[in-house]
RNA sequence: GCACCCGUAGCUCAGUUGGAUAGAGCAUCGGAUUUCUAAUCCGACGGUCAGUGGUUCGAGUCCACUCGGGUGCGCCA
């Protein structure tokens, strides 16, 4: 929960009630610029309009009624009726000391935890992970961590693509040669492409592929065994890559499309019974308002598609998993499909009271501004990208800090390389497409992971050199402007976390952390710590320690590591 | 044809339920270092917020239309 905003909101809400006997939103906001103070209450204009009074008079009245209990140094009325709030540095210091003593930095867990089902990263089986899996893995993971941190019960669902007609052609292709059955994933990836080519060009093979799907879906023992083998190989690879990029997904989170297969017929039957679905051109479909093409629930040949699976999963999550909130992390290209199947699900009554968020994101582009592909037009393998990130980071570490032991440089390179890729991806609003650019990701200047990690390493360096074993619990006093600026920012973490958990926009947390790092750098330049006399030394050391924990907490929530030294 | 997303500084992007003189970074230029890690900091330059009209105390933000870019749309996922 927030520390500053919540108190201000309560105080101004009460003041408005005292002054006008109405409940109005205090319309609290940060000022954005220091000269207007730290926060502002913008309620006076709205209330003045509602009650037909003069805004400045309303602002005066609110100001005279509000009791901030020492929070503010002064309140000023400006412009048409803004009430600017300048926080008191003594009050800030008190609050900062409170959160410094709290393992969760003063951020309370929610009183009534919700069950939040998060669907990510939705990887397809039988193919190596590629660059397209970076964003759902990364964004979904950050969102899961953040929501979990607020105290909600997070249920991760890795809705892998482990079912469907593609497996028919893959199994049929592999069946042609017994040797292919022991293939590794890299080969299966090749088989998949070859099988698809055969499927498109060879009608006899296509028929065999379709027949194989039917046998698989009917539970044919041989087909099932070979299918399981492919899934196992794929899972091994998937978990390895996700682990390499520090994504918190385990096999226990896996609930693939195949899981829902036994429910699909019932889903269709229910939708027909409820009058949501109808027959059209031999298929069973659901028509959704503005769209000219329907959602197909059952194909003319009797088979089911992903729309049916998504509906089955929706129903499963609200009924069996008892979800209070459903979060889906997918490409924005699936927007229409999500509008369609969620509308169908809503009409069927399968949402219950659960909230719903479709977390969409844009495309990663290559240097040419088109979706990122290799020169030959192949998809870029995610594992290779991650390895290259680590290699590039290693070269930077070697150049900057050659005296560190070899294994430590390797560990730093991993944190910086992976962190650089992840932060670059999280740092922008999700919907913007971006060009994959190594130099920008791994730059040590600007709003990048290495800059944040460096700031953290500096906090640790000071603490290390201070000779104090345990981070000091000394009282923080705020004197220098850089100290006050830093303190104000630290105290905003709760507001930011709350906002990100609600809006599901990790880039807001990135911006917060970047500003935190710049403010720490300003403090670092202007305020000597170790060289200062007591009690200033201990106070500043404690300020470093709480800054460090704030940075570390934020980076943890983004799934980005923070080495002690760089 | 139908639908969705986007358009802000030379470049990459922020801009919280509508709030004050639209902010950062990169690049460019100019400064700071016998350092607590310079993987740093300070300053300068840089804007018809694609356009037009509307809503109101107030619009980058909301509404309508236009232009421009991207994407998705019956039996694949």
Image (cartoon, rainbow, N blue to C red):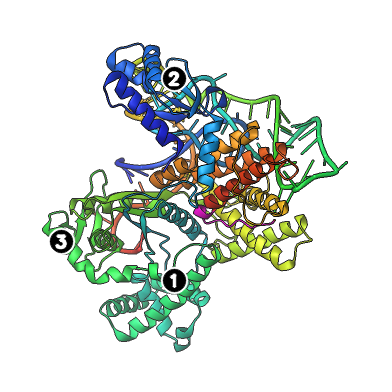
* SS of the residue under disc 1: helix
Residue at which label 1 appears: A197
Label 3 belongs to which residue? A270
Which dot, 1 or 3, sits closer to the camera?
3
The residue at which mark 2 appears reads as A82
Do the residues indicated by labels 1 and 2 lie within the same chain of the protein? Answer: yes
Position of A141 with respect to A324 (left or right) is right
Say which chain tag 2 marks.
Answer: A
* Residue at image coords 66%, 60%: A412
Above or below, comparing residue A271 to residue A483 in the picture: below
Q: Chain of mark 1?
A: A
A481 versus A321 height, above or below:
above
First in sequence: mark 1 or mark 3?
A: 1
Query: Which numbered disc, 1 or 2, marks the residue that appears first in the sequence?
Result: 2
N-terminal-most mark, 2 or 3: 2
Q: Is residue A154 left or right of residue A447?
A: left
| Residue drawn 49% across the image and 56% down it | A138
Q: Is residue A247 magenta?
A: no
Quadrant location of the C terminus of chain A in the rendered image: bottom right
Q: Position of residue A390 (x, y in %)?
A: 64, 62
Q: Which residues are magenta?
A: A556-565
Depth order, front residue of A536/A269 = A536
Given this view, does label 1 or label 2 mark the residue nearer the observer? Answer: 2
For mark 2, give the secondary structure: strand
Who's the residue at 43% across and 77% down the image?
A232
């Amino acid at each position: 929960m927030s520390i500053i905003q919540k108190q201000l909101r309560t105080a101004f809400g009460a003041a408005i009630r005292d002054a006008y006997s109405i409940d109005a939103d205090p319309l609290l906001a940060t000022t954005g610029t220091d000269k207007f103070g730290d926060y502002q209450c913008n309620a006076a204009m709205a209330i003045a309009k509602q009650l037909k009074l003069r805004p400045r008079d309303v602002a005066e009245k609110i100001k005279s009624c509000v009791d901030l209990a020492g929070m503010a140094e002064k309140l000023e009325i400006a412009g048409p009726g803004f009430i600017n709030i300048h926080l008191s540095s003594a009050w800030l210091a008190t609050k900062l000391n409170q959160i410094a003593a709290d393992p969760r930095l003063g951020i309370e867990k929610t009183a009534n935890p919700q069950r939040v089902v998060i669907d990510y990263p939705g990887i397809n089986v039988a193919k190596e992970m590629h660059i397209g899996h970076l964003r759902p893995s990364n964004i979904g993971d950050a969102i899961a961590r953040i929501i979990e941190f607020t105290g909600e019960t997070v249920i991760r669902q890795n809705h892998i693509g482990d079912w469907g007609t593609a497996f028919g052609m893959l199994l049929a292709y592999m069946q042609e040669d017994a040797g292919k059955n022991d293939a590794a994933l890299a080969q299966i990836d090749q088989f998949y492409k070859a099988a698809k080519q055969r499927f498109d060009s060879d009608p006899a093979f296509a028929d065999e592929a379709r027949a194989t799907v039917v046998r698989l879906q009917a539970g044919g023992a041989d087909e099932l065994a070979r299918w399981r083998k492919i899934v196992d190989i794929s899972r091994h690879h998937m978990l390895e890559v996700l682990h390499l990029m520090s994504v918190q997904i385990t096999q226990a989170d896996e609930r693939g499309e195949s899981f829902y297969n036994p429910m699909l017929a019932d889903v269709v039957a229910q939708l027909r019974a409820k009058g949501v679905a109808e027959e059209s051109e031999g298929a069973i479909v659901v028509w959704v308002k503005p769209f000219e093409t329907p959602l197909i629930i059952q194909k003319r040949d009797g088979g089911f598609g992903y729309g049916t699976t998504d509906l089955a999963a929706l129903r499963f999550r609200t009924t069996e998993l008892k979800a209070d909130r459903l979060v889906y992390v997918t490409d924005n290209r699936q927007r229409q499909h999500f509008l369609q199947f969620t509308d169908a699900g809503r009409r069927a009554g399968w949402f219950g009271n659960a909230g719903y968020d479709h977390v969409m994101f844009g495309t990663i582009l290559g240097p040419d501004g088109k979706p990122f592909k290799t020169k030959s037009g192949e998809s870029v393998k995610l594992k290779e990208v991650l390895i290259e990130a680590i290699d590039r980071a290693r070269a930077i570490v070697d150049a900057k800090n050659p005296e560190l032991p070899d294994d430590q440089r390797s560990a730093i390179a991993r944190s910086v390389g992976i962190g650089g890729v992840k932060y670059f991806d999280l740092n922008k609003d999700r919907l913007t497409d971006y060009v994959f650019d190594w130099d920008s990701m791994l730059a040590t200047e600007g709003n990048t992971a290495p800059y944040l990690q460096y700031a953290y390493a500096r906090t640790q360096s000071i603490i290390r050199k201070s000779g104090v074993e345990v981070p000091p619990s000394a009282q923080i006093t705020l004197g220098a402007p850089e100290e006050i600026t830093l303190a104000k920012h630290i105290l905003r973490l709760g507001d930011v976390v709350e906002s990100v958990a609600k809006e599901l926009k990790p880039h807001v947390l990135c911006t917060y952390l970047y500003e935190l790092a710049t403010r720490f750098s300003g403090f670092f330049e202007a305020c000597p710590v170790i060289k200062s006399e007591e009690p200033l030394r201990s106070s500043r050391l404690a300020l470093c320690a709480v800054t460090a924990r704030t940075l570390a907490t934020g980076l943890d929530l983004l799934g980005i590591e923070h080495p002690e030294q760089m």
